[in-house]
Amino acid sequence: MSITVDRAGAILTIDLGAVVSNYQVLRGKIGAADCAGVVKADAYGLGAVEVASALHGAGCRKFFVAHIGEGVQLRESLPADSDIFVLNGMPAGTEDDFFDSGLVPVLNSLREIAAWRDHALKRGHRLPAAVQVDSGMSRLGLPPRDVDTIASDPEMLGRFDLKLVLSHLACADEYEHAANGQQRNAFDRLRSMLPPAPASLANSSGIFLGSAYHYDLARPGAALYGINPTPHRANPMRPVVRLSARIIQLRDVSGSTGIGYGHTALATKPTRLATISLGYADGWRRNAATAAFLNGVRLPFIGRVSMDSIILDVTDCRDGSVGEGDWVDLICEEQTVDQVAAASGTIGYEVLTGLGCRFHRRYVGAA
Ligand SMILES: *Cc1c(COP(=O)(O)O)cnc(C)c1O
């Protein structure tokens, strides 16, 4: 059940107009190539159904999820004109589920290829498939030795409508990393041994490596959601997420008063505190000592982050400018997803996918 705003401690606002605008920026960068939307992990925590439907409205017809369960769920809400690719492959025994939901498995091993081919024989017609090759990340996909095996026995793929040959870059966010060119060369060599099919290599950052990386289809995720795909340069994407929490109590303490768990903070002079209704159970990491913002004014955290609350020092706010029931921003223009991530030694991807499920979710900017 969705959480109404009056019951929520925090609000997650997701700007679908910004997602669409980011999609259009990326599509503009890749020229004639097609642009998919990666909506795995519930669209990086922002809502796969809402995001995919907004992207569909913008012309996107290819979607990637990680797990079959995500694909089955997405299929129920997407028009039938879209392909849904399942990146993590096909667990044994799920062939009927893939078939019934019309999902395209990304086949990562000879075992998966054999199982899906047997299923095509059983069904008596060709089945859609994508094949992933490992061009150097050593995570998923056929190693070169297995691509040799297929090259010597083309019948292994003969029962498929081969929709895509893909691979994934390990170092795309480091634009000068030698692995990028090496992976591109390996990808070209490996796919030349397979039957002709559309090719795909670039994730968000890969798009910014230049046209040699675009092939037939790009697969951005993070950049759609406002994460900077070019960490060494200014962010070309529009912010998508705003996270706001409610001030649930104000108090004035005198000097030498301990504040929060462990009394890690101590008031040394009369101090005004505001407790907000968001904590580490909402995915706000305990080691991210940062601040909240009220109408652009920075309100520093004081003491430890609790499970369901954080204490702010609001001493410097003008009398009456902060009240119980007010909303402060934790992810906003002044404090981006990437900055929040950097403050706790992680990446924007982990911040977004870690956001909890207790928020009131508000979608704005939909077509
Ligand atoms: C997650 C993922 C993507 C999207 O990556 P971003 O860096 O979020 O753009 C693309 N391809 C594969 C195989 C992935 O696992």
Image (cartoon, rainbow, N blue to C red):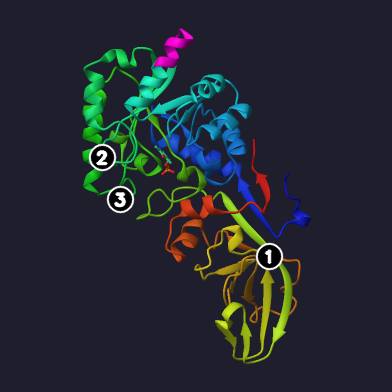
Magenta residues span 118-125
Where's residue 168, x and y in %?
34, 38
Q: In the image, is 341 to the left or to the right of 149?
A: right
The structure residue drawn at horizontal position 36% and vertical position 39%, both measured from the top left corner, is 207
Q: Do callouts 1 and 2 mark residues in contact (Cβ within 8 Å)?
A: no
Where's residue 244, x and y in %?
65, 60
Q: CA distance from mark 3 to mark 2?
A: 15 Å
Residue under label 1, please give it. Answer: 277
Q: In the image, is 197 to the left or to the right of 270?
A: left
Q: Residue type at mark 2?
A: Gly
Q: CA distance from mark 3 to mark 1?
A: 38 Å
Q: Residue type at mark 1?
A: Ser
Q: Rate crowding at label 1 as few (under 14), some (14 to 19) or many (20 or more) other CA atoms within 10 Å.
A: many
Q: Write down which quadrant ligand 1 falls in.
A: top left
* N-term mark: 1 or 2: 2
* Residue furthest to the front: 93
Q: Is residue 125 above or below residue 298?
A: above
Residue 174, label in figure: 3
* N-term mark: 3 or 1: 3
* N-term mark: 3 or 2: 2
Residue 122 colored in magenta in the image: yes
Where's residue 57, x and y in %?
59, 30
The N terminus, quarter of image: top right
Q: Rate crowding at label 2 as few (under 14), some (14 to 19) or many (20 or more) other CA atoms within 10 Å.
A: many
Residue 136, label in figure: 2
Q: Is residue 241 above or below residue 246?
A: above
The structure residue drawn at horizontal position 56% and vertical position 70%, both measured from the top left corner, is 291
Q: In the image, is 6 to the left or to the right of 108?
A: right
Residue 193 visible, this angle = no
